[in-house]
């Protein structure tokens, strides 16, 4: 058979088992393998290779041991198709359009040589995920049949996935197919994209481009690169056009859509594309992009310099900051993970911008200035942008545009015309002005030119406003006026106030007062009371003085009443004083008094009367305001010093006049209050004297320890009353009566101390003074010490008992 062989033999005498050994025919005596052991005299050996020679031998076994092997017998298995498919199917080299595939022979050729290998391949449909469950559904096609163990498959598309399988064939048949292998070709750069086109109508400084997606050759397109070259300005009515700088037209790369990815390709792309364009131009027989002069481009043929204007994944870009009325060429490149495509044909993507307003006029300058006009001239714009300037507009603003900024100023049009110079009239004197000019065309108005500053000649200030009078008194007038409407370019440094007497019989003599700063207020003093004056103001500047203002008249008032005289006082009681005064002599320049104001203040002590002044702000207060020449002040404190002064009041219009001289008056001590307070203190001391214990008595804060040697309880009580009376007098003198003077208080203390000493001698006692707080602290400390001694004694006893018990136990 192809994979097995039958073996039979004669058994020995008394066998216990018959093992059989077999080996390969070409390896007899080298490697023997046991294949059977049993009591039968025949067996079938399986799992042999087809088409192979084998050698068999047998021996018998019994209880004693194994006998010798028999002679070897040779046999061959039948040949079949190759057993198993070829092994190791793999791709050794991968390209974008070709795959190099190799494999190994099968494990056994079935006993016959392999005459051919068959390789099949199936394309994985786009969008279908790779899955072995769907392999049987694919349509496999033969791509190779031969005896080689490798082949190269060409003509494939980039970036596609395939399943491959292989089998082996000999003269007896064909083996099974190998397991399908998934592979793919390498991706390639995208195909060359079509040239970009316009999305919308062109604009003066912007072109919007879009494009379609080219074939990605197996890889997703990740980015696009757009490059641009300027072909120059179109023909227009301009006198001359300078060379366009492409970098100035593009501006900032970030603002024009150029990102970081564009910078990576710029150097390589520019050099490569410029060489390709240059070579193609030479091949056409010319030196420029087309070989012939474009009749619509100013300047004719020229070399092109391409610059990256966009790099990104979008299929749309707006190219900003272009030159108006100019033509541009664009080319496109697509990139994926494998690289970038070729650039599109730039000659098929040439677009032009529309006309725009001219650029700003140049060289604006002042050619003359006077007190009321300024003359200016300028040059035409450098670029008309396809629209010639037909007229110019001059604008003016007050102030310096360089310092303030042109945006924050208010501009007004002062001239419009085709001329390149103008004169601005009817201007104020001494003002600083700023000018700028614009060019007008059919395409619009140009940006303003750079500003130019001019200053007219300064003049004298205009007339200030007529002064107004306020705060009129008997000797002064406060004036206020408005500054001149225009200083005419010269700063106002001050004002001069002129005044004189008003009246037919008044002398024509003017007096002047000058201010050192431009403040519009001034107080004119030292005027006569009840007199009419005329005032006018004049402004002063570095260029001269202004005309006089219109005159204003004002009449001074009467003076306030004079101070009353002969101020005096009479002590009516310890709590009241009656004050008298007299009217001041009459004066025509002063208004008569309508009422009188009496003011009073209390001094802190009698000793402060000498140092007190009449101008103490927090001392006087009003106690009387009526039309009378005397007043009785009540509610005063005994034994205190007061001071008084009086004023004459001229009413609401004139107010109070000056104060009179100050007088000092002291109230007397109230004896009735002293007796009453002393009685109250004696009664309280008598109640406290009843608390007696073991010869110790405490009255308020003084502790008296008395040792009685003679006398009865009645005599001690009588003597103790005498001592309490002395104690009451001491408290009374020390400070219980607030209104007592210091001298009286000191005298009372001395008397009470002497009386107390006499009482102590009469009692026949030894008196010890100790503060109550000290005694309480002493008693408390003594008690605590006793407690501590008790605790220490108890602890010592316990310790001794424990020590004794421990000794007994030991």
Image: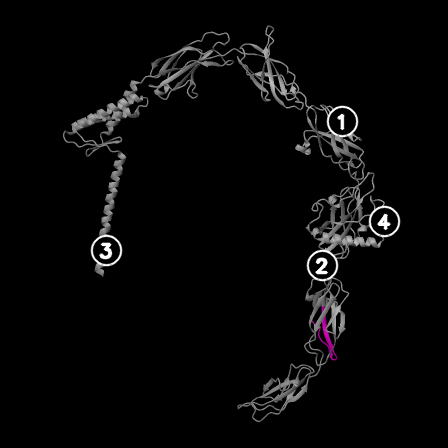
Mark earlier in primary sequence (4, 3): 4
Residue 243 picture location, percent across and down: 78, 43
Whole-percent x, y for residue 310 in the image: 72, 49
Q: Of helix, strand and loop, which one carries label 2?
A: loop
* Marks 1/3: CA–CA distance: 129 Å
Q: Residues within 10 Å of mark 2 (few under 14, many from 20)?
A: some
Taking 195 as reference, is 747 left or right? Answer: left
Verify whether residue 174 appears in magenta: yes
Q: Nearer the viewer, mark 2 or mark 4?
A: 4
Q: CA distance from mark 4 to mark 1?
A: 51 Å
> Label 4 to label 3, Cα distance in Å?
133 Å
Proximity of marks 4 and 1: CB atoms separated by less than 8 Å: no
Q: CA distance from mark 1 to mark 2?
A: 70 Å
**Distance of label 2 from label 3 (alpha carbons):** 102 Å
Residue drawn at (83%, 38%) of the image:
237
Q: Where are the magenta residues, as a range?
A: 164-178
Residue at numbered disc 3 = 802
- Which mark's residue is nearer the viewer, 1 or 3? 1
* Residue 290 visible in this rendered orientation of the protein: yes
Callout 3 environment at 10 Å: few (<14), some (14 to 19), or many (20+)?
Answer: few
Q: On the image, numbered disc 1 is attached to which residue?
A: 423
- Using the image, tell me which numbered label, if any, was put on residue 584: none
User: Which residue is denoted by mark 2 in the rendering?
Assistant: 338
Q: Residue at x 53, y 91 (%)?
A: 64
The residue wearing badge 4 is: 292
Q: Is residue 204 above or below residue 528?
A: below
């Amino acid at each position: 058979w192809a994979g097995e062989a039958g073996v039979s033999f004669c058994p020995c005498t008394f066998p216990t088992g018959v093992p059989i050994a077999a080996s390969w025919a070409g390896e007899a005596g080298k490697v023997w393998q046991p294949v059977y052991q049993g009591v039968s005299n025949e067996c079938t050996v399986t799992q042999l290779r087809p088409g192979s020679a084998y050698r068999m031998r047998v021996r018998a076994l019994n209880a004693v041991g194994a006998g010798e092997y028999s002679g070897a017998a040779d046999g061959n298995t039948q040949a079949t198709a190759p057993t198993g498919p070829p092994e190791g199917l793999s791709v050794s080299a991968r390209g974008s359009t070709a795959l190099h595939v190799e494999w190994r022979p099968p494990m056994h050729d079935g006993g016959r040589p392999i005459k051919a290998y068959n390789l099949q391949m199936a394309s994985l449909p786009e969008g279908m995920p790779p899955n072995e469950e769907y392999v049987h559904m694919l349509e496999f096609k033969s791509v190779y049949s031969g005896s080689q163990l490798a082949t190269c498959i060409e003509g494939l598309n980039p970036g596609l996935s395939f399943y491959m399988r292989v089998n082996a064939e000999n003269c007896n048949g064909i083996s099974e197919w190998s397991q399908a292998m998934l592979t793919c070709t390498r991706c390639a750069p995208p195909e060359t994209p079509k040239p970009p086109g316009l999305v919308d109508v062109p604009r003066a400084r912007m072109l919007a481009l879009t494009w379609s997606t080219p074939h990605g050759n197996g890889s997703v397109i990740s980015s696009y690169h757009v490059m641009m070259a300027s072909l120059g300005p179109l023909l227009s009515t301009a006198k001359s056009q300078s060379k366009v700088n492409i970098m100035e037209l593009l501006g900032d790369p970030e603002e024009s859509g150029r990102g970081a990815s564009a910078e990576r390709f710029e150097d390589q792309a520019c050099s490569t594309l410029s060489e390709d364009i240059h070579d193609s131009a030479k091949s056409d027989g010319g030196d420029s992009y087309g070989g012939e002069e474009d009749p619509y481009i100013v300047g004719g043929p020229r070399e092109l310099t391409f610059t990256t204007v966009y790099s990104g994944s979008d299929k749309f870009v707006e190219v900003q900051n272009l030159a108006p009325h100019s033509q541009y060429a664009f080319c496109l490149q697509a990139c994926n993970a494998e690289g970038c495509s070729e650039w599109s044909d730039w000659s098929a993507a040439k677009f032009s911008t529309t006309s725009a307003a001219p650029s700003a006029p140049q060289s604006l300058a002042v050619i003359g200035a006077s007190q009321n006009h300024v003359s200016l001239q300028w040059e035409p714009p450098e670029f008309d942008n396809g629209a010639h300037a037909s007229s110019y507009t001059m604008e003016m603003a007050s102030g310096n545009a360089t310092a303030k900024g042109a945006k924050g100023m208010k501009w007004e049009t002062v001239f419009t015309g085709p001329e390149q110079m103008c004169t601005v009239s009817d201007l104020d004197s001494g003002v600083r002005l700023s000018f700028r000019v614009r060019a007008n065309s059919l395409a619009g108005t140009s940006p303003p030119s750079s500003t130019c500053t001019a200053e007219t000649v300064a003049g004298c200030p205009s007339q200030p406003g007529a002064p107004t009078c306020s705060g009129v008194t008997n000797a002064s007038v406060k004036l206020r006026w408005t500054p001149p409407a225009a200083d005419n370019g010269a700063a106002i440094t001050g004002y001069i106030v002129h005044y004189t007497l008003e009246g037919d019989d008044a002398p024509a003599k003017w007096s002047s007062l000058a201010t050192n700063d431009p403040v519009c207020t001034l107080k004119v003093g030292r005027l006569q009371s009840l007199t009419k004056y005329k005032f006018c103001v004049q402004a002063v500047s570095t260029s001269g003085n202004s005309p006089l203002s219109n005159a204003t008249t004002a009449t001074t008032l009467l003076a306030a009443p004079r101070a009353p005289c002969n101020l005096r006082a009479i002590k009516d009681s310890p709590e009241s004083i009656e004050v008298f005064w007299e009217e001041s002599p009459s004066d025509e320049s002063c208004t008569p008094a309508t009422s009188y104001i009496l003011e009073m203040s209390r001094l802190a002590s009698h000793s402060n009367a000498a140092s007190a002044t009449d101008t103490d702000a927090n001392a006087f207060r009003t106690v009387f305001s009526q039309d009378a020449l005397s007043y009785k002040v009540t509610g005063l404190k005994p034994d205190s010093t007061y001071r008084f002064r009086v004023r004459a009041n001229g009413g609401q219009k004139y107010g109070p006049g000056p104060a009179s001289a100050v007088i000092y008056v002291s109230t007397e001590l109230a004896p009735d209050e002293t007796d009453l307070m002393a009685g109250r203190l004696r009664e309280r001391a008598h109640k406290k004297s009843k608390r007696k214990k073991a010869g110790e008595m405490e009255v308020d804060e003084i502790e008296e320890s008395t040792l009685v040697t003679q006398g009865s309880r009645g005599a001690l009580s009588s003597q103790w009353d005498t001592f309490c009376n002395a104690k009451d007098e001491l408290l009374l003198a020390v400070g219980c009566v607030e209104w007592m003077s210091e001298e009286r208080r000191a005298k009372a203390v001395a008397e009470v101390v002497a009386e107390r000493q006499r009482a102590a001698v009469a009692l026949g006692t030894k008196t010890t003074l100790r503060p109550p707080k000290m005694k309480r602290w002493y008693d408390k400390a003594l008690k605590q010490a006793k407690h501590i001694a008790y605790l220490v004694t108890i602890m010592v006893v316990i310790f001794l008992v424990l020590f004794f018990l421990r000794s007994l136990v030991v």
